Amino acid sequence: MRNHVLSQQVIVVEVKGEAADIVAQYSLGKILAIWALVGLPVALLAWVVAPAAIRSSPLHPGIVYWLLMIAGMAWQAVVGLTILYRELGTLRWSAVRARTWLQTPRDPESGRPERKLFWWLVPALLFSALINMALAGYMDAPMARLLPGLQPAAYQDNAQLVSPEFQGAWWLFGVLLASHLFNYFLGEELLFRGVLLPKMQGAFGRYDWVANAALFGLYHLHKPWMLPSLIVGSLAITWPARRFRSNWMAIVVHGVEGLPALVLVPAVILGLMG
């Protein structure tokens, strides 16, 4: 009997927590302001700062661009942590974890944590792979007609880093780890899924996860030729996170795209490629 009462209390806490989230939702204006605060600086770094820095830097152009993109993602971490501190009054892990949904997936009906819900990552990952590996070229093709003069510069192509000059350059692996940290956890995921997604229902209702995917795709103004596939592919990140109130699911789906680099970069450093 006592266990039954305790389980009811847990459900009440979950329901009350969700209700509190709904009350404290962000306005559309605030959502767009946060998007602009993190999206526009990255575009500025890519289109204005990068060309100037590359002309004056002795580093490989691809490395200069990569470091600037990491700086942009680190800025997202600063913005995200600042917002969380202003809202919570602390950055204690327990408080941040609850606010950003870094928790075991919750059953949509009962609110109970259920580890078996992680199996929903399988269709999410398959959908992401379908978009990124099979359909992206078709989806992005219209952008070449809409923006014929806007194509990626050579230094924006990661393949340029497959070069003999990086053999033995183990510092490059440190750059990769920093990039992954801010890309898949402390930067993009913290800001878009941790800070924004739990607070977007008030402005977008049941389609908050779609709006989050659109905002995340449009944040990639430094890759405008990829916007259609980025927006659609991001649905695989936002849907399980919103449906099961667990951003660990978003981190996994998003982070899988970075796994090949963990093999390729050491291969380049060891001289196995290039």
Image (cartoon, helix red, strand yellow):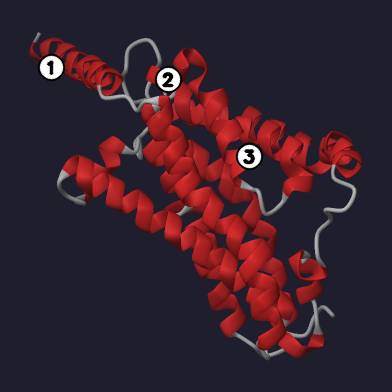
Q: Which mark is residue 31?
A: none
**Which residue is the site of mark 3?**
217
Residue at image location 88% in from the left, 53% down from the top = 149
Q: Closest to the observer: 174 or 33?
A: 33
SS under mark 1: helix
Residue 129 is left or right of residue 39, and the answer is: right
Q: Quadrant of the N terminus?
A: top left
**Which residue is the site of mark 2?**
203
Instruction: Please tell me in which quadrant of the rendered image residue 159 appears.
Output: bottom right
| Disc 3/disc 2 C-alpha distance (Å) | 18 Å
Q: Residues within 10 Å of mark 1 (few under 14, many from 20)?
A: few
Q: Nearer the viewer, mark 3 or mark 1?
A: 3
Q: Are marks 2 and 1 in contact (CB under 8 Å)?
A: no
Q: Residues within 10 Å of mark 2 (few under 14, many from 20)?
A: some
**Image position, residue 174 (x, y; %):** 53, 77
The earlier-in-sequence mark between 3 and 2 is 2
**Image position, residue 117 (x, y; %):** 47, 26
| Disc 2/disc 1 C-alpha distance (Å) | 34 Å
Q: Amino acid at mark 1?
A: Leu
Q: Closest to the observer: 106 or 162?
A: 162
Q: Quadrant of the C terminus?
A: bottom right
Residue at image location 39% in from the left, 40% down from the top = 194
Residue at image location 37% in from the left, 40% down from the top = 195
**Image position, residue 85 (x, y; %):** 22, 49
Instruction: Confirm whether residue 70 shows in the render.
Output: yes
Up-down relation of residue 1 to residue 71 (above or below): above
**Which residue is the site of mark 1?**
6
Q: Nearer the viewer, mark 3 or mark 2?
A: 2
